[in-house]
Amino acid sequence: MTDTRTSKADASEAWITGIGLATSLGEGLEANWNALATQRVNVDDKGFAPHLVHPLAPVSFDAQIPKKGDQRQMEAWQRIGTYAAGLALDSAGIKGNKDILARTDMIVAAGGGERDLAVDSAILNAEAQGNSAPGFLNERLMSDLRPTLFLAQLSNLLAGNIAIVHGVTGSSRTFMGEEAAGVDAARIALARIASGQSDIALVGAAHNGERKDLLVLYEFGDFNLKSSFAPIWARNAHPGFALGSGGAFLVIESRQHAEARGAKPFARLTQVVADRTSRKHPGDVTKSLAGLWSQLDGVNDSGAIVTGATGAEPATSEERAFLTSHPGFAVRATGTSFGHTMETQFPLGLALAALSIAKGKLFPPNDSAGVEIETTAAPSQIVVIGTGHWRGEGMALVEAVR
Amino acid sequence: MAAPRDRFGRPIVVVTGMGVVTSLGAGKADNWAKLTAGESGIRTITRFPTDGLKTTMAGSIDFVPVDPFSSTDLSERLADLATEEAVTQAGIGAKGDFPGPLFLAVAPVELEWPQRQALGRVIGSGTPIDYDQMLRVAGGGRFTDFHRRFLFGSVADHLAETFGTKGSPISLSTACASGATAIQLGVEAIRRGEADAALCVATDGSVNPEALIRFSLLSALSTQNDPPQAAAKPFAKNRDGFVMAEGAGALVLESLEAATARGARILGVLAGCGELADSFHRTRSSPDGKPIIGCVRNALADAGLDPEQIDYINAHGTGTPENDKMEYLGISTVFGERAGKVPVSSNKSMVGHTLSAAGAVEAVFSLLTLEHQRIPPTINYDVPDPAIPFDVVPNTARDARVTTVMSNSFGFGGQNAALIITGEPA
């Protein structure tokens, strides 16, 4: 188990001082909060039928990516992420602050690999029609691939674009590996701040769910939600996830750094823990989550949990079994409202937990299965859970600043 | 006995095991013999047809059979080999029970053409093929293995399972600096006291048609195909691009305290790591060289060393006109007059550019340089570039007293990383 905590004696406290969200529910904190408050869900059942996806709400990319040339150099997932990162920097009040941005460490959780669907299809069709001369694939790729598409496919080029557009250059690291990458990005950023290896970090991820090439990858494992929408906890008969588009970025900094520049925190990021069980036996995920929970220091007997549960099985049922052993907690599954944003789901969960703490209330349930219960209590602690659809378990403790 | 902490009060991080695979061969012994003999691993590509390609050579690894071929499968095999060698040398933990976390540098994983073509065959020639048709036939269990294989975390997941690393394995990409970043993450974890040991692995098996064409379309590759062994010409005036290559490097890092306690042989010290991102351009370095300069200075500061104390630089040295010029600008700015005196050689002249793996492969070679007190050459250096007056150790290996090495890695997306490695705990 890898454990990162800030509660050790000489460790720096880490604050979340900036949040940027661009999702299927809208752009910015208020739009997302209001959509959650009214249980609005934006799901497209036609564009990718029979598959469901949560498409990105309209955003004006110009507002955060002023140069059209920059926008053209990116594919959608990078534009979403660069946009959300800009919102986070704005939110933290460090946008354009060259001194701080030049030493801001960046950890991005990313996928990549966005394809040119027309090029792929044309090549496969030609091959199906018998064109299998040696070098045929070479010739087509040489003439049909856009040179800049490669840069949209490279995982580390979301971070690269954030550096170019927003000037974040302290360091640039990109973690890959689906849901777990989002957990580990936050875990390592926190560990570095807590130990004094870093003062301030931009952490987050972005995902474009409106991609047939990605749907194909998850369809290989029969993970896509089909035909009709249901909340995460009501998918027993038809398990799966609906991919979601969205970007979620956080500015995390040491308390000292935040106070020195007069920054207001949304919340404190106290701990991030992560593990990987090989899921060979039924109940492995439940056990792994219980192990992570036991690593969290000072969690009260009741409170709130924001989970990125995917709806994929058996992971979601096993997580549900874990949740039933903590009946005092009001649970919220972000996948119902936002879809499954893969690498982004955990940073999104952290963002919503921090926002809920800052607002002094948890957003309402959106569930027909009775897992999510109403609460009016002002949350002082929220546990964020990220259980990967195939691998990886993570947990974070987000707390009110005292 | 040396103090277990460095001058900044941090645990000293040492190397106790290393493994390497390149186009020169598998294992440290074979690689070192060929590297110091100035041999090239670059050859004409036979893995796939090269008709219509401007570049037809690479440092591909064909002695590790993977059938059916995918770059991800080969990356995994190469990582297995390098890791096995490193863990065996370290003699740490038990088989399948490595007592620390995994940091893996790996190329971004994606579905490849053979898999796409497999979908096409299922759809058949009677139906126009598009992604809707691919989606229609993808599910139902016929291609379940493709899901497992082409997740971004799949290689790390395999290594974690095989070698029993602890916690959540991290897969990372900082493009061609990835290998150095994997090592840096391990160093940081040990310095934080989070772990006594870390397994840092970097692997790349990317020589497939589309990957080659992508770099070719960016005009990054050498096109001097004949003879292939002469294509990679770092720092030479007639250099015309890098040569794609495959490989893997693995390092077992430990705190000096833990390594000493178990009586492990110490192969070297990871004294410092530096990084700095460049916001100038997606594929080019800032013309003023500031990010590279800052990166090198950060590494020196992290190690608590002055430039005068570096006595060999294992260059990034890709052999692209731009990279080598910028690397000279960076080093000459930091090192001043010494830039022309300190030996600077590029392993890539022989093994090619192993991309995601390069930082770790070259860290292993830097450690071997310290161990053998012999500097591998920069081969194919027949036409010196007067604009880059480095001592590149031209064409022939050289015996030298080497105590402290700097190894540089730079990548697309403004990635810069530098490592400082010493032979003895300070």
Image (tube, rainbow, N blue to C red):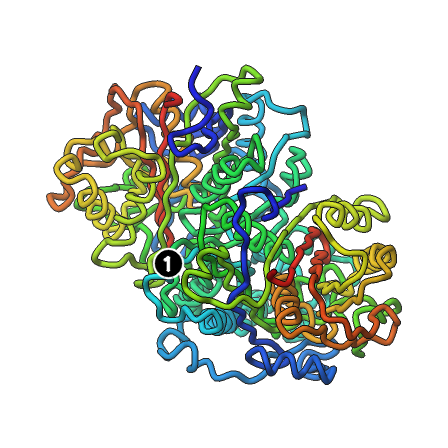
User: How many numbered callouts?
Assistant: 1
Residue underneath mark 1 = A169
Q: What is the chain letter for disc 1?
A: A
Residue nearer the viewer, B122 or B156: B156
Residue nearer the viewer, B358 or B143: B358
As drawn, is A59 to the left or to the right of B411?
A: right
As drawn, is B144 to the left or to the right of A206?
A: right
Q: Position of residue A129 (x, y in %)?
A: 59, 69
Residue nearer the viewer, B150 or A252: A252
Disc 1 secondary structure class: loop
Quarter-wise, where is residue A377 in the image? bottom right
Residue at image point 65% right, 60% down: A399
Amino acid residing under circle 1: Thr
Residue at image point 45% right, 57% down: A200
Say above or below: A253 vs B176.
below
Q: Position of residue A217 (x, y in %)?
A: 66, 62
Q: Position of residue A385 (x, y in %)?
A: 71, 58
As drawn, is B336 to the left or to the right of A62?
A: left
Residue at image point 38% right, 53% down: B415
Quarter-wise, where is residue A343 in the image? bottom right
As drawn, is A47 to the left or to the right of B16?
A: right
Residue at image point 46% right, 61% down: A258
Asked if residue B231 shows in the view, the reply is no
Quarter-wise, where is residue A373 in the image? bottom right
Say above or below: B253 vs A97.
above
